[in-house]
Image: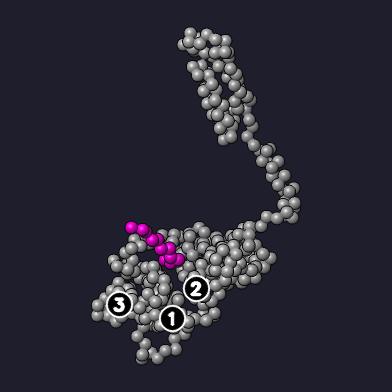
């Protein structure tokens, strides 16, 4: 049975370690795997993080499904492998999903239908989505039992292929398909997710990356004013706006630089200096030793030809470097095979 591992940014039983849960992928809905996920979601407060920024303008006297229940049902369905909102039309009567939403498996009300969930997903505007993202950053900071002295933020993007005509789905020549290109930020020392931001399927610009990092770092510093932050990213995150922002916010950074002829020419003096320094401090190679091949008594009687009695000299290097050891083994093996009955 295939296994599915869930990585969540929430409260961990051990400080600094992510909260993980492993389930059988085929047992998620039928045998109550969603019920276990529901307990984890309640512990983390994921539904509240998502639905608190949403404005509910419905008549309270006619509300059957709260936003928190709707968000919980949607999360459980996605975690069980039912990513389409239409799947809830069938799963709304599933006993496990009803228990996951706090309802009795038989006598409880059925869950919400697809049109109700679609209205919920269309409630959020751009500002609301930003608030939800900041809520997940707050959840990340609350997951630490102690305030860390230093954190490492790894920022990168990935491709999310789109198979329809979704809004903001663009053709990406590097990926070779129509996709979204969300940006994800993880904390490297603990593996906890910090932010996942959906965005169009194109390469992010320096201004866009700087805008995202400004909000993330400012939100983290709001909880941890004295924490030291190191930002790591690939070469397309190395732009003037990003570097200027990290310097202004007193953050360390390790960003890649795209290779080009101009940079290679500028870096040539430093490259030669590094090569010289490496050669200077390289371990000294010992002197070459000569091993004389002498025949055994059996070989003297068995082989009487001048060619078999000829002595063979081998020069090997007794250095401590891996390359010299490989050469030594190769030379010894070759001479042993050539000598036959001869011994060193």
Graded by Cα atoms within 10 Å as few (under 14), some (14 to 19) or many (20 or more), the crowding at tag 2 reads few
Mark 3: which secondary structure?
A: loop
Comes first in the chain, label 3 or label 2:
3
As helix, strand or loop, the secondary structure at mark 1 comes to helix
Residue holding disc 3: 93
Residue at 29%, 67% in the rendered image: 30
Specify which label sits upstream in the sequence, 3 or 1.
3
- Foreground of the two, 307 or 200: 307
Residue 118, disc: 1
Q: Which residues are magenta?
A: 1-12
Quarter holding residue 287: top right
> Residue at (33%, 63%) from the top-left corner?
26
Q: Toward the viewer: 70 or 191?
A: 70
Q: Nearer the viewer, mark 3 or mark 2?
A: 2
Contact, mark 3 vs mark 1 (Cβ under 8 Å): no
On residue 164, the disc is 2
CA gap, disc 3 and disc 2: 29 Å
Point out residue 261 in the picture as x, y percentages from the top left corner.
73, 54
Q: Nearer the viewer, mark 1 or mark 2?
A: 2
């Amino acid at each position: 049975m295939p296994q599915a591992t869930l990585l969540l940014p929430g409260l961990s039983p051990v400080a600094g370690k992510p909260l993980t849960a492993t389930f059988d992928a085929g047992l998620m809905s039928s045998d109550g795997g969603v019920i276990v996920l529901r307990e984890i979601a309640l512990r983390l407060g994921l539904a509240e993080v998502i639905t608190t920024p949403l404005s509910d303008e419905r008549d309270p006297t006619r509300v059957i499904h709260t936003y928190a229940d709707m968000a919980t049902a949607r999360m459980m369905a996605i975690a069980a492998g039912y990513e389409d909102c239409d799947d809830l039309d069938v799963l709304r009567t599933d006993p496990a999903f009803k228990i996951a939403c706090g309802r009795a498996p038989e006598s409880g009300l059925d869950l919400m239908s697809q049109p109700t969930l679609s209205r919920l997903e269309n409630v959020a505007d751009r500002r609301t989505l930003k608030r939800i993202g900041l809520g997940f950053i707050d959840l990340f900071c609350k997951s630490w039992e102690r305030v860390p002295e230093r954190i490492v933020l790894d920022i990168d993007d990935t491709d999310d292929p789109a198979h329809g005509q979704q809004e903001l789905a663009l053709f990406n020549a590097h990926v070779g398909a129509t996709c979204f290109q969300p940006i994800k930020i993880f904390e490297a020392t603990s593996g906890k997710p910090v932010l996942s931001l959906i965005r169009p399927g194109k390469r992010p610009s320096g201004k866009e990356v700087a805008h995202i990092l400004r909000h993330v770092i400012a939100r983290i510093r709001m909880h941890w004013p004295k924490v030291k932050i190191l930002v790591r990213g690939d070469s397309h995150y190395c732009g003037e706006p990003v570097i200027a922002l990290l310097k202004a916010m007193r953050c360390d950074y390790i960003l890649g630089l795209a290779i080009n002829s101009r940079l290679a020419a500028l870096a040539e003096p430093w490259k030669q200096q590094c090569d010289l320094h490496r050669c200077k401090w390289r371990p000294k190679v010992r002197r070459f030793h000569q091993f004389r091949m002498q025949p055994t008594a059996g070989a003297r009687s068995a082989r009487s030809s001048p060619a078999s009695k000829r002595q063979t000299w081998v020069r090997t290097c007794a250095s401590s470097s891996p390359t010299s050891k490989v050469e030594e083994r190769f030379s010894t093996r070759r001479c042993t095979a050539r000598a036959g009955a001869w011994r060193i």
